[in-house]
Image (cartoon, rainbow, N blue to C red):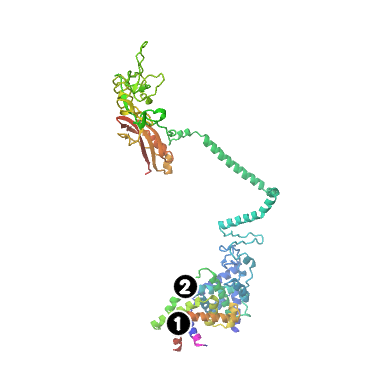
Amino acid sequence: MADQTTDEALVARAAGGDEAAFLALYERHRDAIFRFAYRLLGAPALAEDIAHDCFLGLLRRPAAFDPARASLRTYLYAAARNLVLKQFRRPGVEVTLEDLHDELHAEESEQPLRRLLAAEVSEAVRRAVLNLPPLQREALVLFEYEELTLAEIAAVVGADVGAVKARLARARENLRRQLAPYMPAARREGER
Amino acid sequence: MTGEEQTLKLLLASWDAPDSSAHLGRRVADSFRQMMRRKEEGAVMKRCPMCHEEFAPQFRFCPVDGLPLVPAEQQDDTILFGDRRAETERAPAFALAGDANTLPGARAAVPSNGVVRRVARAGGEYHLTMLPETGLVTRLTAEVRAVARESQLTWPELRRDPAGFARRTAVAYGLLLRRQFAREHFAFGVACALALMLTFGGALVALDRYHKTHDPAADKVRDDLVYLGPVTDIPLPARDEEGAAGRGARGAGGGSAPEKTPAHGGGGGGRHEQTPASVGKLPPATWEPPLLAPNPKPPAIQNPHLPTAVTLQGDPVLFPPDPSPRPYGDPKAQAQELSSGPGDGNGIGDGTGGGVGSGRGDGYGPGEGGNTGGGPMTRGGNDTGCCGGTRNYANAVFTTRDVTKKAVITAKPEPTFTEEARKNGVTGEVVLRMVLASNGAVTNIVPVKRLPDGLTERAIEAARRIRFVPAEKDGHQVSQYVSVVYNFNIY
């Protein structure tokens, strides 16, 4: 509750031209919004654009944020989601593989073979998530990665909880089918 | 949670998202400052209601969609994607981020099929209008269909009452015309258009008449062209043939023999005169040896007691009597001065005997023994007779194959280019067919292949200056056909 109040106050001050308040808001929510956009789009550059527009949109119409209905993060997720969907509507969505390169060079301490295998699995998961239909993808990302509750997801995507659950179930089914070759290995990894 | 779900969670966890870059923070801060500055200046950004692109305040239309821009504050950031049904269902569900119905007018302006986009005139301001995107063929087809539909509607009416239909149509069109002319400036515009059309048409007619009455000889004044006169195909004299002799009875046959046989024979004569044999008529012929040879200048015999007819020896049908008062002579000779010619034997010509021509005997023409047709005398019959006797080498024109010695061109001046042809870059060849006449002149020039811009005329002019040694046949100088090619090249 204290966080919400603070968010609301920060929004009010930022709308009045307080740069420090705006930057505080940005620092507080940028990672979540950026990660969410990235997992929906699969490209860091596009995700940055979405995060940028999302925060500026908050300033453009600060009155649109109603703290009585949802938290600021939920509002920002919803705004980011809409911007992402708008991005999908454009012909020729840009998708880069810069992140793949980054992931391949992560975790230098691991063994080379394991690192290679982990990179392959990570890329397969990324491809599988990005292959999901947009509505299933956003539900899955919000639930699995952003750990929002079903009610919060329903508020973000503008659907009821039942619809969100159905989308999640379909998304999981899709993923199981796509990631079937990696399932036994992952299970063994989990048992270890 | 089942094991499978856990496995899936593990797999999903393997995909890490990168951190946002520091550049994003700077970018957001810059945008914030810029926005605040604009807000202080009172400037309002505009946005396209269709593609949601933002534009500076001075712009009025989206260059992509052609829609009028609206202030960005009115813009809806929560327009969803996917199918339109889903949008309308979801849009109001989350009202936190804006109202989806702020621009009903702009949305209505975009048709679902995207064929015609038209922005209505709103608030007295003219808005951009997009032209139809349909192709010419589609529009033409639509027009034709409309006409066909109209015809289907009016045809029964026309059949039922043609006169009434015509009257009503005339009245309707008259009313329409009157209404049109009642419009401001319409009559003036029509009058101007008519005047323009009449002026244009009159100018065309005047130009046509001017060209018709224009004397082609006026081309003479041009420096780059020389008027050589029209090229006409002058009919050539009929070619004389050697061989089949005489005029057959009633036009059929080379003599009086029943079978088809060319007549042969000939004769000649002369009285050792210096001048060549003169032109004249032939005496009639009999198969009997003649008693009296023809003489262009018969001696005056006063009161002859036993008149003797002048005859040749030959087929009578080939030598019909000539009642004209002309003196005797060689019909194919050129000389007018009466003479029996330099031959021998009292006949006429340069042969020997009592006949006429260059042969030997009492017949006519080259050959011997009498009769006519060349060679030793035989009686011809039942053949188309023609032109026996001496050959008219001077008037005949031969092809290269027929002459015994071809004409030799000693000088062939090359034609020059015309300025016009040079300007137009005309190149190619002109082929002329002409006669290298026995008298050394070039006649009957006929272009076979032409070139424009006066090059054909230049070639003809050059051909007239050709110098040559005439062709020969049987020792006589004769005329010969030749084709001459003139190449026109620009280097």
* Along the line of sight, the residue nearer the viewer: B150 or B491: B150
Magenta run includes residue B40:
no
Mark 2 crowd level (few <14, some 14–19, many ≥20, 10 Å Cα): few
Is residue B59 visible to us here? Answer: no
* SS under mark 1: helix
Is residue B363 visible to us here? Answer: yes
> What's the CA distance linking mark 2 and mark 1?
24 Å
The magenta region covers B2-6
Considering only vertical position in the picture, is A7 above or below B49? below
What's the chain of the residue with tag 2? A
The residue at 33%/33% (across/down) is B467
Rendered location of residue B269, percent (x, y): 30, 21
Q: Using the image, tell me which numbered label, if any, was put on residue B473.
A: none
Residue of label 1: A182
Q: Using the image, tell me which numbered label, if any, was put on residue A96.
A: 2
Magenta run includes residue B3:
yes
Considering only vertical position in the picture, is B420 above or below B283? below
Q: Are marks 2 and 1 in contact (CB under 8 Å)?
A: no
Considering only vertical position in the picture, is B273 above or below A81? above
Total count of labels: 2
In the displayed structure image, the side of residue B204 where residue B104 appears, left or right:
right
Amino acid at circle 1: Tyr
Rendered location of residue A37, percent (x, y): 52, 76
Rendered location of residue B434, percent (x, y): 38, 35
In the displayed structure image, the side of residue B65 where residue B383 appears, left or right:
left
